[in-house]
Amino acid sequence: MTRNPKIDEMRLDGGVPCLDFVNTVPDRFDGSDRDNLNNFSDLIYWARKAGILDKGAFAALEKAGQTNEKRARDFFAEAVDLRDLIYAIFKPIALKQKVRPADMEAFNKLTSKYFPFLEVVFQKDKFKEEWNFPPGHFYAITAPLVKSAHALLLSDTWSRVKECPNCGWLFWDTTKNGKRKWCSMEDCGSSAKALAWYHRQKK
């Protein structure tokens, strides 16, 4: 697996896979077109980093992408559309606003498209959910992201989705007091505090 330093350096601060996927856009506030995902190879590399794909699934998808480059390009565009839809749903939630009915309708169509591939199996004395895609199926990348968004919306803590005021990343606040403000205290939190200190000193 060829290294991808840009994605290797990415933080996974969303708290759940669907929000980590949304946060593959480096900064939602800087007005640029920067994107950490620019092609199918970037997408599967990120999915491996995020724990969505294991080593075997990554290798199968890498081979599938090389075998059918056009389908890989088309699927990458579909994945970006999914990212935009997840952002469109959880951004207003983070701002305590209503989600557009059209976005929920589009999401429900997606779940009906993916969930027929989800089955319950019994393994090692317990039941678990499992996707029954064949090896190398592109949906193996996006299906867990759809499931992650679905689970978060149905959880008791969906209202704890927040937006970082520094970069616009979305994150699920699982702190006890629910007072987390930044996507990362080490990054955005420290940057904002340093800037505030600078302005105080300047005054």
Image (cartoon, rainbow, N blue to C red):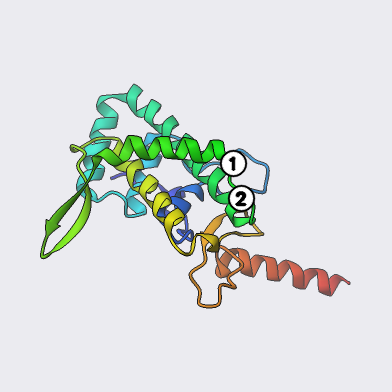
Q: Is residue 120 left or right of residue 2?
A: left
Q: Which residue is mark 1?
A: 100
Q: Is residue 163 above or below residue 113?
A: below
Quadrant in the rendering for residue 201: bottom right
| Percent coordinates x, y for residue 73 in the rendering | 39, 27
In the rendering, which numbered label is found on residue 9? Answer: none
Q: Nearer the viewer, residue 120 or 188?
A: 120
Mark 2, secondary structure of its residue: helix
Q: Position of residue 92 (x, y in %)?
A: 61, 50
Label 1 crowd bin: few (<14), some (14–19), many (20+), radius 10 Å: few
Front in this rendered view, residue 89 or 78: 89
- From the viewer's perspective, is 118 left or right of 26? left
In the image, residue 69 lies at what x, y percent?
Answer: 32, 24
Q: Residue at x 68, y 66 (%)?
A: 192
Query: Label 2 to label 1, Cα distance in Å?
Result: 9 Å
Mark 2, residues whose alpha carbon is within 10 Å: few (<14), some, or many (≥20)?
A: some
Query: So how many labels did they put on this image?
Result: 2
Q: Which x, y percent locates residue 202?
A: 86, 70
Amino acid tagged 2: Pro
Q: Residue at image x 25%, y 26%?
A: 67
Q: Are marks 2 and 1 in contact (CB under 8 Å)?
A: yes
Q: Residue at x 59, y 41 (%)?
A: 100
Q: Mark 2 vs mark 1: which is more N-terminal?
A: 2
**Closer-to-camera residue (43/160):** 160
**Residue lying farthest right?**
203
The secondary structure type at the circle numbered 1 is loop
Q: Quadrant of the C terminus?
A: bottom right
- Identified by mark 1, the residue type is Arg
Nearer the camera: disc 2 or disc 1 = 1
Residue that numbered label 2 is attached to? 92
